Image (cartoon, rainbow, N blue to C red):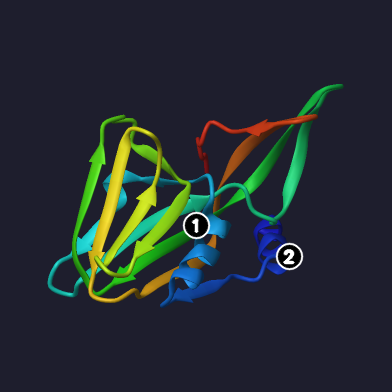
Amino acid sequence: MAGKAAAEETHELGCIVATTANDLLSIADRLHDEYFDVDEIAWDEKARTLDIPFRRIFHDGPSRRIKNRLIYWVDEVDVLRCSLRFLDVVTYTLDDRTNIGALSLNRFHYDEKRGVVTLECCEECGFSIRVDGLRAEYREMGYRGKARITRGICWDSNSSQVYE
């Protein structure tokens, strides 16, 4: 419990509201290479909202060194649970040909003329959201779970696996 309190003390939970393409880019900068589970996407057609819960592994929160070798090391990080919500959604399309379940958020693009937000996840995935005006909210909910990041002198990676 003390570790969880320490984690929350070192990182103030954030929120970004996007109503312009530049605002959306600031969300995209924060979310680059973070993972979401395709099965957890929630579309409420009546409320016109699309919620994408995801986890942030690469964040500035606390980490613990669990292995230290000459050219690489392994850190354990607390996983920051977040949500990305789009409002005034007309429809969305997710074409995931990878069928791996967990996709990374890489880039966002907003075409104001067409009213389409495109989320670039990977080469074999198309994710577009048709909206009546851009209104997106990024929220950090808290820490839950742990993940391991292997880092080397010039690289870092993780398996996107989260454990409790």
Residue count near mark 1 (Cα–Cα under 10 Å), binned few <14, some 14–19, many ≥20: some
User: Label 2 amino acid?
Assistant: Thr
Mark nearer the N terminus (2 vs 1): 2
Quarter of the picture holding the N terminus = bottom right
Residue 141 visible to an observer of this rendering: no
Residue picked out by circle 2: 10
In the rendered view, tell whether residue 135 sits above or below residue 155: below
Residues at marks 2 and 1, CA–CA distance in whole angstroms: 15 Å
**Is there a contact, CB below 8 Å, between mark 2 and mark 1?**
no
Q: Nearer the viewer, residue 151 or 145?
A: 151
| Kind of residue sitting beneath label 1 | Arg
Q: Which residue is outermost to the right? A: 70
Residue drawn at the location 55% of the way across and 66% of the way down? 26
Residue drawn at x 64%, y 53% is 59
Q: Position of residue 36 (x, y in %)?
A: 40, 47
Residue drawn at the location 72% of the way across and 37% of the way down: 75
Q: Position of residue 25 (x, y in %)?
A: 51, 63
For label 2, the crowd category at 10 Å Cα-Cα, with few meaning under 14, some 14 to 19 and many 20 or more, is few
Say if residue 89 shows up in the picture.
yes
Q: Which mark is residue 81?
A: 1
**Picture coordinates of residue 38 (x, y %)?**
30, 44
Q: Nearer the viewer, residue 54 or 92?
A: 92
Horizontal relation, residue 68 to residue 117: left or right = right
Mark 2 secondary-structure assignment: helix
Q: Is residue 162 above or below residue 135?
A: above
Residue 19 rendering spot, x and y as whole percentages: 41, 77
